[in-house]
Amino acid sequence: MSENNSSNFIKNIIINDLENKKHETIITRFPPEPNGYLHIGHAKSICLNFGLAKEFNGKVNLRFDDTNPLKEDIEYVNSIKEDVEWLGFKWDNLFFASDYFDIMYEKAVLLIKKGLAYVCELTQEQMKEYRGSLTEPGKESPYRNRSIEENLDLFEKMKNGQFKDGEKVLRAKIDMSSPNINLRDPIIYRISHSVHHNTKDKWCIYPMYSFAHPLEDAIEGITHSICTLEFEDQRPLYDWVVRECEMESIPRQIEFARLNITNTVMSKRKLKQLVDEGITDGWDDPRMPTISGFRRRGYTPEAIRKFCSEIGVAKSDSIVDSQMLEFFVREDLQQKAPLAMAVLDPIKLVITNYDENKTEMLEIENNAKDETKGKRLVSFSRELYIEREDFMENPINKYFRLFPGNEVRLKGAYFVKCTDVVKDENNNIVEIHCTYDPETKSGSGFTGRKVKSTIHWVDAKNCIPCEFRLYEPLILDSEDNENKNFLEQINENSVSVLKGYIEKTQMENAKPSDKFQFVRNGFFCIDTKDSSDDNLVFNRIVPLKSSFKL
């Protein structure tokens, strides 16, 4: 499923390892914690790990790092599986970190027996004080030199539920003066009397991620443990755990730059806050940068994979313009999405010299880019709807659409000329009256005169009322992002809702998640949650055009 075969430093490491016979088979893994829904940053990691395994004829594991029962849920497990499959990938093995809790406990006991782990009773505040800083070494815990026998006894009592949450922890005994703070006797087990989604109430002690993760990789025989740059400082601890726990398989941790996108929050904690505080209507809100949100909005997996491939793999962080992702979505949909005529902000147009009892079927193309997709028949009659912005009673300079006395072409139909307007008691225009020239029918070969504008329409007799949701970025970027609470950057105008109409022809067999190119209005998708047969709801995926250049 790799979208291109361009080289990067991770591929070069793998190629070198294979050439030197370090590994016979490459095994990667995608190891999300099931404490939220996946976002676009995870998509980059998914594409990288699954793509490398495919390219080098290796294997890839989907593994849930479920070591924190307080935050994890089976809902997230199921959503992650769905997202990975929707992106177009299949895992070779499915594992849970909790599958290895017995082994992890045994390895913790081994560290105690080797004098490399001890039970500590410092409070969180005391531990922070003892840890030191980047410029000052830490201080040893007064419990650091307990005997092996005492530590084994206390750790077993922790396992047996004889202590309260937070009362004791198990710490690795490494180096309190290390310049790398991660090696200053990190916690490797904590007490948590909570029910786990997988192991239920079997355990009341749980391993810390920094201890569990290297063990999981080693147990599964992962050859290349690929993670983001924030784990670079933890690599010495990763290697220490694998070495001192005497694991047979020795994985190699490799770090790459995480994905950062303008106008986008890339933190599960912050995304969960948006959901919990009701700022969005769920993890799959079309404004959310979650994979489920993109799916509901109408993004395609092909476009996301192409985007992840194009941004590449780097060793230093950078920020990608969000319009780049939209570019690939637009490129993909131009080939796939059938054309449809929809009027989002309607005003009625009446052709006064057209027979009020007549309806004719006009041929209009199905795809703007591909003539082989053929044409469809769209009904046309005396009363139509056009976009309100396509009429101006007092036109500004260089306005070429419809205004009193001006003539335009109705797409796929005829020339019409505005003769007058009808207004209500508040002087608002409610109807536009036009006459049409039957000689100017599209496809007739008429060359008598030209018009400067073509506008789209829907037949008032044969259209479907529907709701259109137009989206703007949920997060407003600013020059002072680092010093701002991200909630202060919420765009209060991130969604606008319009009530309009769409032609019936393209909707005859339409279903939720179907995508269309609305003439002049952009690419739209039928919403999978709120849309129904009685109330069609469309999400705008992306506008037709962008200033972004690849």
Image: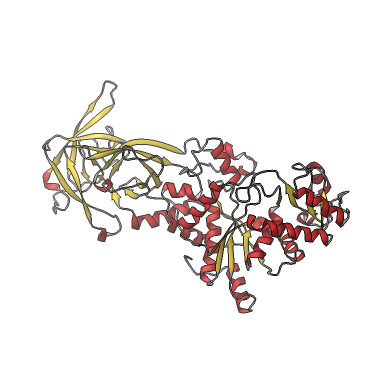
Q: Classify residue 192 as left or right of residue 64.
A: right
Task: Point out residue 184 in the picture as x, y percentages from the top left corner.
Answer: 80, 54
Q: Classify residue 93 as left or right of residue 529.
A: right
Task: Point out residue 129 in the picture as x, y percentages from the top left corner.
Answer: 82, 45
Q: Classify residue 383 as left or right of residue 54.
A: left
| Residue closest to the eye, 321 or 1 | 1
In the image, what residue occupies the spot 60% across and 72% down? 14
Residue 522 position (above or below residue 179)? above
| Residue closest to the eye, 281 or 65 | 65
Colour mode? secondary structure
Q: Classify residue 127 as left or right of residue 260.
A: right
In the image, what residue occupies the spot 36% across and 36% down? 498
Residue 418 visible in rendering: yes
Task: Point out residue 439 in the picture as x, y percentages from the top left corner.
Answer: 11, 47
In the image, what residue occupies the spot 81% across and 46% down? 127
Figure disc tally: 0
In the image, what residue occupies the spot 47% across and 59% down? 305
| Residue closest to the eye, 295 or 96 | 96
Task: Point out residue 324 in the picture as x, y percentages from the top left corner.
Answer: 47, 54
Residue 182 position (above or below residue 409)? below
The furthest residue to the bottom:
20
| Residue closest to the eye, 461 or 218 | 218
Residue 320 visible in rendering: no
